[in-house]
Each structure stands twice: as structure tokens, then as C-alpha cells.
Amino acid sequence: MQSIEDIWQETLQIVKKNMSKPSYDTWMKSTTAHSLEGNTFIISAPNNFVRDWLEKSYTQFIANILQEITGRLFDVRFIDGEQEENFEYTVIKPSPALDEDGIEIGKHMLNPRYVFDTFVIGSGNRFAHAASLAVAEAPAKAYNPLFIYGGVGLGKTHLMHAVGHYVQQHKDNAKVMYLSSEKFTNEFISSIRDNKTEEFRTKYRNVDVLLIDDIQFLAGKEGTQEEFFHTFNTLYDEQKQIIISSDRPPKEIPTLEDRLRSRFEWGLITDITPPDLETRIAILRKKAKADGLDIP
């Protein structure tokens, strides 16, 4: 099972990418994972000033990242050194509903908000939405692989998660795996270091749907590309669905091996373009409604 220290280090890596270096060094760098109390992830801050600021400014941000990493919705609590001395520890036993990675079985890394019902359809994403829904309704039969590309924040990840949720809801015991190519790379490197490559391959080659985000980060990583090539072939040959996202089409990803590029082009390639004004307004209204806000 993944330890809370490992989860927190992974969280910090994501935080670092979304904060300026001065802000990260000031507020986050000295924090540590303290403990897990029920469904509350407790983080230790160096002093009460940092604790209060984190509590005020970053609680929801951290909770969202933890959910992305683990697939679980945690409450987040910050404590400082003085509170830590008086803290009563509780031993938390792994829930039987968790698998060996500490993730809920069949819900690996899926954001509960990212479903088809919450996706706002517009002219720039209509085809990608239709293709994703077709894949969700008939995995490995409609388009395989499905390759979605476009800029940051346009809905690629939302559609991938929506497919995962739909498959889980309509197919009993379906194994859905979502991860970024960076996580795939890091786990592959760790498996080599720890002599656990067979376990790594079993994990990723025994799923019904593989959703891999930001595939462009495999560029230049020859060993990881080799491993993903064989993972892709295994899943494709066994008629398992593969969905890939990127910020650009396969032909524009530099130093991507030709054999991978050609496989990405076997299925359907679709893009998502920036939303027009009407779609942006619709997105804002839907987000406001989801957050319980009433806007005219």
C-alpha cells in the first residue's frame, strides 16, 4: 500500500508545478505528511503562521490534488509543531475496499466530478465528446486507440475520466486505470530499481481500459517508450480500450518513436479547440451551479 509519505511527496511535486518557486519555498517546502485519521489527511507545518496561511489558502487545492492522486476524497487538516506534540495517534488499518496500492478497486484515479453529465458541449469539443461517448458505450469496438489532443484546460482529462466512469457504471468489475505518462515513467523506473518489472507489467497489462494523460512527456524517454510500446500491443491484441491525450497530435510530438506514432494513428485522432464565448459562459454557469452559486 502506498504510504502517506509517498502520497505527500507526489502531492508536493504537483504543487511545485502550480506555484511560483518563492511561494512554494515559503509555504509548502517544509511541510510533511503527519498521519491519516479516518478520512482526514493531516499535514504538519513548521509553525502556526504557515499553518494558518495554508489552512486559509490551500486546503481545497491540496484536497483536489490528493483526490487526483488517490481517487479518494480526503478532508485536509494542517497542524503545527506545538499541536504535533499533543497529537494523539490512531493506527489506521487499510480498508478491505482498497487494493494493494491503497486505491479503491475499480476507481483508480478517477475524479468524481468528471462525468459526461458535467461536460459542457460546444463547437470546439463536440466531435471529441461524441467519440468519447462512443468509446465508453463500446470499449475497443468503436475507436481504438482514441487519441485526444488540445491545449491545457480544454477538457481532455474530463472526457477521459468520463469514459472511465461510464465503463465502470455499465460493465461489472471493469478494470479502469487512469494515470499520466509522467507517473507511468516514474513507476517504470522504480520497478527497474526495485527489481519489480513483472509486477509493473502485470498492473498495466491487465486492465480493461487504460487512460493515459499527457503522452507527449514520453518524448525522448527511450526505455519508457519501449515499455509503453509493449503495454500498448498487449492491450490492443487483447481488445482492451486505450485512450491517450496530448497537447499536440502524434506527428508533432518530437523524438516519439515511429512505431508508437503509427500505433497512435491506428484508431481515431480528434482535437479540442478553445471554446467560443457562448460555451465559456455555459461552462461558468455549470461550474457555479455545481458549487451551489446562483448567478443571473
Image (spheres, helix red, strand yellow):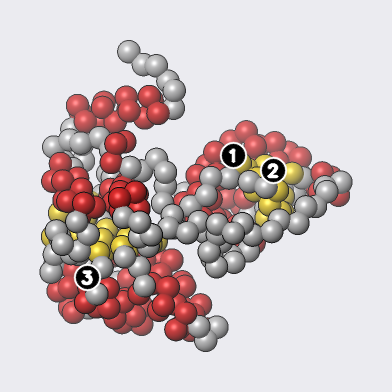
Left or right: 213 in relation to 191: left
What residue do we see at 36% from left, 43% from top? 114
- Which residue, given by chain and number where applicable, does mark 1 sit on? 59
Task: State whether residue 143 appears in this view.
Answer: yes
As drawn, which residue projects farthest toward the bottom?
Answer: 195
Disc with the residue nearer the chain's start (3 vs 2): 2
**How far apart in space, not on screen, are marks 3 and 2 (Cα)?**
46 Å
Q: The disc labelled 1 sits on which kind of residue?
A: Thr
What residue do we see at 42% from left, 20% from top? 293
Quarter in which the N terminus is drawn: bottom right
- Which residue, given by chain and number where applicable, does mark 2 sit on? 78
As drawn, which residue projects farthest toward the front?
Answer: 172
Which x, y percent locates residue 14?
A: 49, 55
Q: Is residue 195 above or below residue 72?
A: below
Q: The disc labelled 2 sits on which kind of residue?
A: Phe
**Label 1: element kind:** helix
Q: Nearer the viewer, residue 81 or 289?
A: 289
Quarter in which the C terminus is drawn: top left
Q: Nearer the viewer, residue 232 or 95?
A: 95
- Which residue, given by chain and number where applicable, does mark 3 sit on? 239
Q: Nearer the viewer, residue 38 or 150?
A: 38
**Label 2: element kind:** strand
What residue do we see at 19% from left, 56% from top? 138
Disc with the residue nearer the chain's start (1 vs 3): 1
**How far apart in space, not on screen, are marks 1 and 3 (Cα)?**
42 Å
Q: Is residue 63 above or below residue 30?
A: above
Q: The disc labelled 3 sits on which kind of residue?
A: Gln
Q: Do the residues under discs 3 and 2 have CB atoms within 8 angstroms?
A: no
What residue do we see at 46% from left, 71% from top? 186
